Amino acid sequence: MAKSDASGPVTPLPAARRRCPICGKPAAARHLPFCSPRCANIDLGRWLKGNYRVETEEQSEDATGDGEP
Ligand SMILES: [Zn+2]
């Protein structure tokens, strides 16, 4: 879904123009660098998971791009 406010130029965020590493949405100041507590939780889960499974040969998680070339 793309939200388009009328037809105006993209307004750059003042403080942080980061994007949620989980879903790619604009990060919320309250939950930086995530957009929501849910995404923060997801990331935490991933992290813990990866931390516990050290001996597993997991493929790089390059499935989702962050939009950064
Ligand atoms: Zn998110």
Image (cartoon, rainbow, N blue to C red):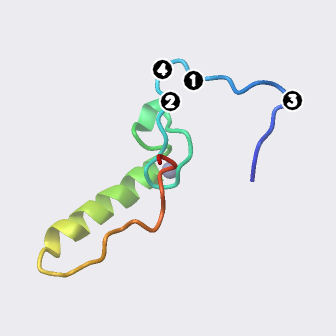
Mark 4, other Cα within 10 Å: few <14 / some 14–19 / many ≥20: few
Upstream in the sequence, badge 4 or badge 3? 3
Upstream in the sequence, badge 3 or badge 2? 3
In percent of the image, x 48 and y 20: which residue is there?
15
In the displayed structure image, the side of residue 8 where residue 10 appears, left or right = left
Q: Pointer 3: what residue?
A: 7
Element type at marker 2?
loop
- Amino acid type shown at disc 1: Leu
- Amino acid type shown at disc 2: Arg
Mark 2, other Cα within 10 Å: few <14 / some 14–19 / many ≥20: few
Residue contact between numbered discs 4 and 3, judged by CB atoms under 8 Å: no
Residue contact between numbered discs 1 and 3, judged by CB atoms under 8 Å: no
The label number, if any, that marks residue 17 in the structure image:
2
Which residue in the rendered view is the most extreme toward the bottom?
A: 56
Q: CA distance from mark 4 to mark 3?
A: 23 Å
- Answer above or below: position of 24 versus 50: above
- Amino acid type shown at disc 3: Ser
Upstream in the sequence, badge 1 or badge 3? 3
- Amino acid type shown at disc 4: Ala
Element type at marker 3?
loop
The label number, if any, that marks residue 15 in the structure image:
4
Q: CA distance from mark 3 to mark 2?
A: 21 Å
Residue 3 on image: x %, y %: 77, 42
Residue 40 on image: x %, y %: 39, 50
Residue 33 on image: x %, y %: 40, 39
Q: Pointer 1: what residue?
A: 13
